[in-house]
Amino acid sequence: MKNQKIYEADDKMITLIKDNYALLQTLGSFGINLGFGDKTVRETCADNGVDTATFLAIVNFTINGYSDFEVDESLSIPTLLHYLKASHAYYLDFQLPFIRKELEESISPADSVGKIILKFYDEYSHEIKRHMMYEHKTLFPYVEALLNGVQVGDYNIETFSKHHGAADKKLKELKLMIIKYLPADTYLNNKLTATLYDIYNNEEWLRQHSMVEDKIFVPAIRLLEEYTKKEDVTKNISAMVFKNGQDNAETLSDRERDVIVSLVQGMSNKEIADHLCISVNTVITHRRNIARKLQIHSTAGLTVYAIVNRLVDISTVKL
């Protein structure tokens, strides 16, 4: 059952799941593990290195279509990228094979019409894979380059947006085939009906996924592109990666700053531990806290942060 309300950072995460069980898959795409007890959305996101504002924007949008929010620097593009990549992996590696297996078990091997349905499904799978792999090979690397202050040829987000459409036409046709085909055998009819139910859920998932890309991701990348065109690229990019361009250095402890500097200089966790005379586990804890406080999850992002906040001299950094 869906409970259409606007969720906020101080709501308990378990409340979101109880109201909308479909969010379980969304948690996985953000990399949020179960077992969060009675923690709030803010606390759960912080524990898992997820930007709270971005998480809530997607959750509220997919639950009830709430889009009355500004796509600005308050959204984390790295978090959006992680969400989209994980969503693709979920659909390609789990959902597509799962439905294929259900269809195989629901259709008699001797049934010629059943074989046609399986062939049609395989064609659909190929099309959706091609659709998503384009984003992995072209769109996502382009966005990652922008985050590093690099313009890539003539490609831009408008090129993607103009040709981006929901890849679900074959899925709709497949549903109609199954509905018209349902076998007389009661056992197979029940299995095929269950498969059809899953296909309907997949269709809704694809629709929401496409809307998140169109209504949240694309506008965020447009804004990022505008920042890269400005004169002070490094400073502007840091605003998009580190939230409102605010200097978050004051929220870090001295030891966390030391860890950042060491990471930027290319040290491993073991080397950092030896250098700072602390344990490797302590280094890992510091890195987790740094990611939570800054919402930065890559060495490249920390490098830009360290330069902008003068934790290191740019001349000492290997770019």
Image (cartoon, rainbow, N blue to C red):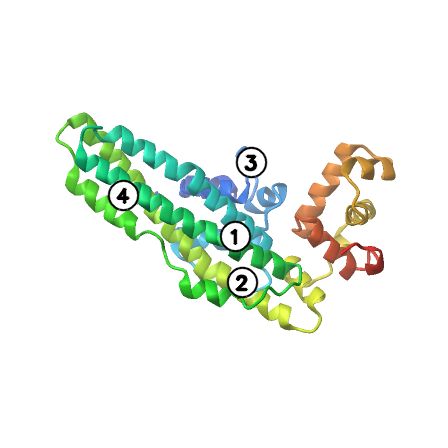
Task: Name the mark nearer the viewer: 3 or 1.
Answer: 1
Earlier-in-chain disc, 4 versus 1: 4
Q: From the image, which quarter does the C terminus lie in?
A: bottom right
Percent position (x, y) of residue 296?
67, 51
Asked where in the image residue 19 lies, by quadrant, the reply is: top left
Extreme residue toward the bottom, this view: 231
- Judge left or right: residue 254 versus residue 213: right
Of helix, strand and loop, which one carries label 4? helix
Task: Name the mark nearer the viewer: 1 or 2.
Answer: 1
Extreme residue toward the left, this view: 184
Residue identified by numbered label 1: 137
Q: What whole-number distance in Å separates the C-alpha atoms at marks 4 and 1? A: 26 Å
**Label at residue 36:** 3
**Label at residue 120:** 4
Q: What whole-number distance in Å separates the C-alpha atoms at marks 2 and 4? A: 36 Å
User: Number of labelled discs?
Assistant: 4
Of helix, strand and loop, which one carries label 2? helix
Asked where in the image residue 94 lies, by quadrant, the reply is: top left
